[in-house]
Structure formats: structure tokens, C-alpha cells
Image: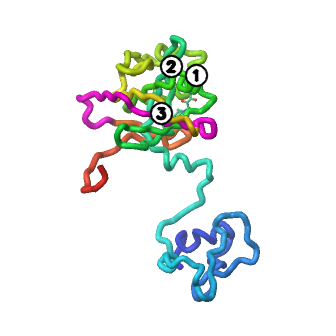
Amino acid sequence: MGTGQQQCWVAKRHGKRTDSRRTAEGHYRTPRRCAMLPWRRPVQVTPDRTRRSPVVDVFSPEPAMPRRSLPLGRVYGLLEPGPVVLLTTSHKGRANVMAMSWHTMMEFEPPLVGCVVSGRDFSFRALETTRECVLNIPTVELAKQVVGCGNTTGERVDKFARFGLTPVPASLVGAPLIDECYANLECRVADTRMKNRYNFFVLEVVAAWVNPTCREPRTIHHRGHGNFAVAGEPFKLTSRMK
Ligand SMILES: Cc1cc2nc3c(=O)[nH]c(=O)nc-3n(C[C@H](O)[C@H](O)[C@H](O)COP(=O)(O)O)c2cc1C
């Protein structure tokens, strides 16, 4: 075992200086009681080693990176893809806008974007009914308006007026573009099969607009619980990824 925090990252939580699951030879004991905690799930070791994945043999017994357990409720902050977008809809003559960061690319072309829109959001019903929206991508200059749109509901507030955002007509969908955003993606709902279970909509981008003068957009990325980061320094590496 290494020193300090490295030495104890498993054992510390349990008040022990060493990992008592291991024998002097470094093999894992089979725990007598198998608790529900994931770290206590036994690594299967049988004498003939047939049930143990060979890759386990190359696991380092001395992890170098200090680790602490993260509450599951904070996991999303690590994986939130960002950038935070402003999703606009138009329903029954009313345009609305909400902040959204739970989205993911699903296909190159035609571009498909999956996103989670809570059933509690006023936007949900508009998106469900009209099957159209625009994903507007703001930069850091709009951060306060973004959070404002994420903390008020269009049921009671005209957010365009309140936050000084300008709706302009889109080319193919009824929802408006937000003029102040550096990019706007006009979308139609392509798949709702996971809507009831996960509030998950698959959107197809049918038209896309970008401000050509904005070379390095400083987009904002949500890290959870009101913490944000701005897109950092760009760099390039050879990659086979498109
Ligand atoms: C940074 C940020 C990200 C958000 N991401 C999402 C999201 O991905 N999905 C969602 O349903 N709500 C998300 N919200 C919350 C909605 O924006 C919020 O519930 C909003 O009030 C809904 O507006 P509406 O009722 O007018 O539709 C986010 C809020 C913030 C501040």
C-alpha cells in the first residue's frame, strides 16, 4: 500500500489503516457478510481462478489518485454535458423559454439530440403538443438570463420580456429563435418512446444557425447546484473522430 490518503482510500471510511479484505499476499478474502454497499461486493476469487476476469490481475493494488465517495445525488454534476441551452417553444400563441442542460448528441446527420424535459416544466406540454422547439445556445454574457429562465415558469411569466430576450421567427418551426444566442437549432420531435418513462425526447435538428462572427463561443456548462464553468481554451489533437 502507498502512503497517506492513497493508502487508506478504501479503509479510511471504515476506521481501519489497511484494507482488511486483502490477505498478506494481496489476494481478496471472500467477505463473510456481504453488505449492500457496492465497495463490499466480493471480487470473486476461486482457487482455479476460472471465475475471475483476467483483467483484475492488472489492476493496481496501489491506486495513485486520491478518491472520496461522492453522494449519488451529485453524479450528474460530473457528467452534465453542457452547454446549457435555452429551449424555446410556442403553444397557443405563447412563446416560452426554459434552461436545459440534460441533453446529448445521438446522431451526426441528420443531427439527433436527446433531451430530458421534466413533466413539471410548462415547456413539456408545449413540446409534447407542438412537437417543435428551438435549442438556442447562449454564451456567458447571457448567464444571468439563463439562470432566470431556469428558475421561473412560463405559466406565469413572459420570460422574453422579463429577461430582455428577443424572439425572432424560425425558418421551419413555430418556436422562436433567441436573437441574443450565438447558435440556434430548429428541431422537430423525432421519437417520444422514452417520454413517459424518462421525459426523454429525441429531437431532429432540421435547420441550424450560427453567428459567424463568434469564433470561440464562451458557452456555459452546468456543474450542478448553481455551479457553472465557461468553455475553456480550445486545443487540437489528431483524432479519427469526425
Ligand atoms: C442550468 C439549468 C439547467 C436546467 N436543465 C434542465 C433540464 O435539462 N431539463 C429540465 O427539465 N429542466 C432543466 N432546468 C430547469 C428548468 O429550466 C426550469 O424548471 C424552468 O423553470 C422550466 O420553465 P417552464 O416551466 O417555463 O417550462 C434547468 C435549470 C437550470 C438553471
- Badge 1 marks a residue whose secondary structure is loop
Mark 2 and mark 3: span between their CA atoms? 21 Å
Mark 1 residue CB less than 8 A from any atom of ligand 1: yes
Looking at the rendered structure, the kind of residue marked 3 is Ala
Location of mark 2 (residue): 96
Looking at the rendered structure, the kind of residue marked 2 is Asn
Looking at the rendered structure, the kind of residue marked 1 is Thr
Query: Magenta stretch: residue 209 in it?
Result: yes
Q: Is residue 57 above or below residue 102?
A: below
Mark 2 residue CB less than 8 A from any atom of ligand 1: yes
Q: Marks 1 and 3: which is nearer the front?
A: 3
User: Which stretch appears magenta?
Assistant: 195-217
The disc label shown at residue 218, or none: none
Horizontal side of residue 143 vs 119, given as left or right: left
The disc label shown at residue 153, or none: 1
**Residue at x 59%, y 33% (from the top left corner):** 118
Q: Are marks 2 and 3 in contact (CB under 8 Å)?
A: no
Q: Earlier in the sequence, mark 2 or mark 3?
A: 2
Between residue 132 and residue 184, name the one nearer to us.
Answer: 132
Q: Is residue 191 above or below residue 72?
A: above
Location of mark 3 (residue): 190
- Badge 3 marks a residue whose secondary structure is strand
Based on the displayed image, in which of its 4 quarters is residue 111 positioned? top left
**Residue at x 47%, y 33% (from the top left corner):** 190
**How dense is the environment of label 1, judged by Cα within 10 Å: few (below 14), some, or many (20 and up)?**
some
Q: Earlier in the sequence, mark 1 or mark 2?
A: 2
- Badge 2 marks a residue whose secondary structure is strand
